[in-house]
Image: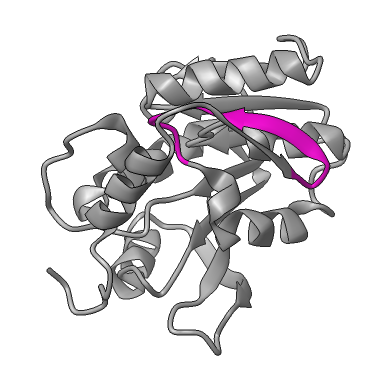
Amino acid sequence: MNQYYKIDPRDIVKDIMNTCKDKTSSVVQGLEFDTHPNVYPSARFRTTQFIFDNIITKIKNKLVCDMGCGSGVLGLFSLKNGAKKVISADINPFAVENAIENSRKLGYNESKHEVFLSDCFDRIPLQRFDLIIFNIPFHSDNIMIENPLEKAFFDPEFVTVKKFLRQCKKYASNKTEILIAFSNKGDTKTLESIFDFLGFKWQIWRIKNTNSEYDNRLYIMKTGK
């Protein structure tokens, strides 16, 4: 196990599975939404609020892609705050079902919000997004994934991130902004070297909690076309 771990993320997953065996309800930024078992509980983690605080000025009238959507709350927040349309995607079938349910509960149909069961962009119709957002897993240890919920916490050897970034180039114009949420709890050096290797122009756009043991950061990227 790498030195930057102080808490084994598997213990976090076990705790969530033990305490969230039933559907739970939350209110985040005025959005009432449900979280199903085996779905990343966004309201529990400070990263969600950090993303909300920073994308608010970037989503109005935009075509937004919410990758790794979980319960769908980020995409629904975007629609509430003026996004033209949102495409959400997750590799976890429990999350996709959850996001669809929350979308219907809030009155959105497929003309405003489409949700796909997809490994990155594999099943997403080709289009050019204005904004692509991915709150990626913080942990990159080469482990065997044992259940769908672990995919929200683990991306062994950054395999998913690499795939996402390679596919991004087909779904982005030279004006598209790509936002990746991460933390120095993870291997920032390797992640940034991946950005460079794949030819992206990037910077740490926002950073918070630098006085804590682990920060929260948003990378903003363009394809470099």
Q: Residue furthest bottom?
A: 211
Q: Is residue 1 found left or right of 137 in the rendered image?
A: left
Q: Is residue 138 found left or right of 142 in the rendered image?
A: right
Depth order, front residue of 65/137: 137
Q: Can residue 148 be seen in the rendering of this structure?
A: yes
Q: Quadrant of the N terminus?
A: bottom left
In magenta segment, residue 10 = no
Identify the residue shown where x is 58% and y is 80%: 209
Q: Position of residue 72 (x, y in %)?
A: 61, 31
Q: Vertical placement of 212 versus 92: above or below?
A: below
Q: Vertical placement of 30 versus 49: above or below?
A: above
Q: Can residue 225 be seen in the rendering of this structure?
A: no
Report the magenta residues as a range. 28-40
Depth order, front residue of 155/10: 10
Q: Vertical placement of 183 versus 63: above or below?
A: below
Q: Position of residue 79 (x, y in %)?
A: 80, 31
Depth order, front residue of 175/91: 91
Identify the residue shown where x is 37% and y is 27%: 91
Identify the residue shown where x is 75% and y is 33%: 32
In magenta segment, residue 37 = yes
Depth order, front residue of 53/22: 22
Identify the residue shown where x is 33% and y is 36%: 149
Instruction: State the count of labels.
Output: 0
Q: Position of residue 48 (x, y in %)?
A: 61, 53
Q: Position of residue 103 (x, y in %)?
A: 70, 19
Q: In the rendered image, which quarter is residue 140 located in?
A: bottom left
Q: How is the image coloured?
A: one colour
Q: In the rendered image, which quarter is residue 138 located in?
A: bottom left
